[in-house]
Image (tube, rainbow, N blue to C red):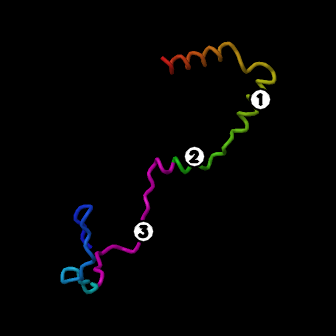
């Protein structure tokens, strides 16, 4: 089928000489052994290690919960550091 612009569409054309299928040729040996090889980049290896990590670091969660319960988590120094980081991001 030939398409000439958006207004002229012709019907399917007959198959002719240059489009005739060629005789199947036997694959040529290139001296390559039949061994496949896979090289994994360091980045892909790191990503696969990240997927193996647990979703929640329970020891960290338990530590912070204990600090909150005892009233020692929100110290003035931590609040000042958080405020400073926030102002750095805004400014």
Pick the quarter of the image with the N terminus: bottom left
Mark 1, Cα crowd under 10 Å, few <14 / some 14-19 / many 20+, is: few
Mark 3, Cα crowd under 10 Å, few <14 / some 14-19 / many 20+, is: few
Q: Secondary structure at mark 2?
A: helix
Mark linked to residue 36? 3
Alpha carbons under labels 2 and 3: distance apart: 27 Å
Residue at the limit of the structure toward the right, as seen here: 70
Mark 2, Cα crowd under 10 Å, few <14 / some 14-19 / many 20+, is: few
First in sequence: mark 2 vs mark 1: 2
Residue 81 lies within the magenta run: no
Q: Secondary structure at mark 1?
A: helix
First in sequence: mark 1 vs mark 3: 3
Residue at the limit of the structure toward the left, as seen here: 17
Q: Tell me which segment is drawn in magenta.
A: 26-45
Give me the residue at 50% from left, 50% from top. 45
Q: Are marks 2 and 1 in contact (CB under 8 Å)?
A: no
């Amino acid at each position: 089928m030939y398409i000439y612009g958006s207004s002229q569409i012709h019907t399917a054309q007959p198959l002719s000489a240059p489009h005739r299928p060629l005789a199947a040729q036997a694959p040529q040996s290139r001296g390559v052994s039949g061994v496949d090889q896979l090289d994994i980049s360091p980045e892909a290896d790191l990503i696969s290690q990240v997927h193996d990590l647990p979703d929640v670091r329970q020891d960290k969660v338990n530590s912070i919960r204990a600090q909150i319960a005892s009233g020692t988590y929100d110290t003035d120094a931590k609040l000042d550091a958080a405020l400073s980081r926030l102002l750095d991001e805004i400014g």
